[in-house]
Image (cartoon, grey):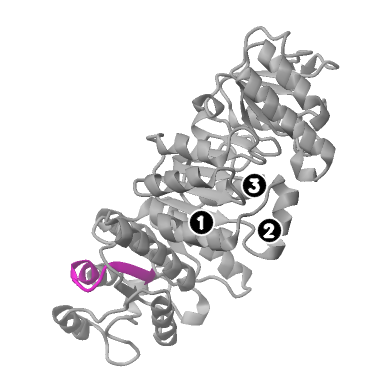
Amino acid sequence: MTRFFSPGSIAIVGVSKRTSGLGGMAYLSYLLESGFPGRLYPINPKASEIRGLRVYPSLTSLPEVPELVIVCVPAAQVPSVLEECARNGLKHIYILSAGFRETGTEEGKRLEEEIATIARQRDLLIMGPNCMGPYCPSSRLTMWGAIPGRVGELGIISQSGGITQRLTEYTCFLGVGVHKAASIGNATVLDSTDYLEFMAQDEGIRVIAMYLESVRDGKRLFHLVREVNRQKPIIVLKGGETQAGASTVASHTGTMAGEQRLWEAFIRQTGVIQVLSMNEWVDAILAFYHLPGPRGKGIFLVGGGGGNSVLHADTCIREGLDVPNLSGANMERLRRIVPMAGSIAGNPLDLWSTFQDKACLAEILEMGYSDPHIHMIVVDRLIPRKVYHMPDMPDSTAEVIDFIKENRHKKPTIFTVESEGGDPDLASKGSVLRAQFCEAGIPAYPSLERAARALRHLQCYHARFGT
């Protein structure tokens, strides 16, 4: 299956002369924009040149056998394209076209069954139909999502093209690179289990994210996930959990969502990380991608102010984490450096100096790293603004990042950058600050609630598998 993600040549069947939504012309344009280094062959019997490239009337007329074929023609024409592929020795085929089983019509079902039959008889590997296809930044195969994307160690398998596209964009701007992503749509020939087995063997992938609505072979998925998840964390966003969601699945990929109680048993018995939203998915990916495994549930909350500290502690406890007292020696150290008025010496720690003084923050973090009761650290990073009467001073963010990078192997350390509330200037500054940390490989979250949930996923996984 490697050729899907690193082809040396691509033929695009169905490239029109003008761009009109998602289709052959759009894909050709994106491949050129991303700097795809291989050979591109647009197929259109009514054109001779598009975007400076020679256009061919058919696959048979090409000067070579391309390594990947992208099919962007109407559904009714797809079977004949597949037959032409088979006659010319083309085996790796990605079908963008929709109009099959997901339509709920007899004709759509018949066409999809014909695809399956041709693939079986002609020994074709087919991705799709009704999907966004393969994505691989290292190969400059980025026809959707972030272009040209960020190279990394995340693998993505998704039954939804839009969700896959959003995830590749989201992670790209938060410092997480993608090794390979597969938007698989109706998964008529190659199913999610085929891609999971492939990514399990790919040494370039450390973390796997999956969006599933249904699966054809539940038993195979169960055994694969249970085995692979021990070595590579699998973070699953499951669609179709509610009655409304399940009924929509049929018109999305033409499949039936499984019974919720079966999925719950699947999650429980495999230990896979289940998330319930796009934000929670990305938050968990950040944690598993960047952080070492914690050795316990104890969290040290640094900063946040008095009232916020109370709420933050409550949030962590509700997530099943602990907010323990520091050891006696560290409590003595805190009492010596924390002013009695306007601060809280303990855990949570309310100490204004941690926002302003890099040396003070480093001293506090060293206490957390050395404390046997503490296993993870969350630092609130305040955005300087007028309401806090913060004097003009050099931005210490770069120095703080350097310190964390030097010490992050000790214990998982993350930041929260609270910037919500409707102030566009605050939101903009918050996004920039968060991106600075994430670009450096330090997870930063827009709220303590999201940070705590991500750390809970991380802690539960490592507690189960002892890694």
- Disc 2 and disc 3: Cα gap in Å? 14 Å
Q: Is residue 371 magenta?
A: yes
Asked which secondary structure carries label 2, the reply is: helix
Residue where numbered disc 3 is placed: 160
Q: Nearer the viewer, mark 2 or mark 3?
A: 2
Total numbered circles = 3
Q: Is residue 146 magenta?
A: no
Give the residue displayed 20% in from the left and 86% down from the top: 335
Asked which secondary structure carries label 3, the reply is: loop
Furthest-right residue in this view: 46
Image quadrant holding the C terminus, namely bottom left
Res. 217 in view = yes
Residue where numbered disc 1 is placed: 282
Question: Is 428 on the left or on the right of 96, as rendered?
Answer: left
Give above or below for 212 relative to 341: above
Residue 123 location, quadrant:
top right
Residues 347 and 271: in front is 271
Residue 185: assigned label: none
Query: In x, y percent, where is residue 464?
Result: 32, 60
For the record, the magenta segment spans 366-379
Give the residue displayed 36% in from the left and 59% down from the top: 461
- Disc 1 and disc 2: Cα gap in Å? 23 Å
Residue where numbered disc 2 is placed: 246
Give the residue displayed 76% in from the left and 26% down from the top: 78
Identity of the amino acid at label 3?
Answer: Ser
Identity of the amino acid at label 1?
Answer: Val
Question: Is 293 on the left or on the right of 64, as rendered?
Answer: left
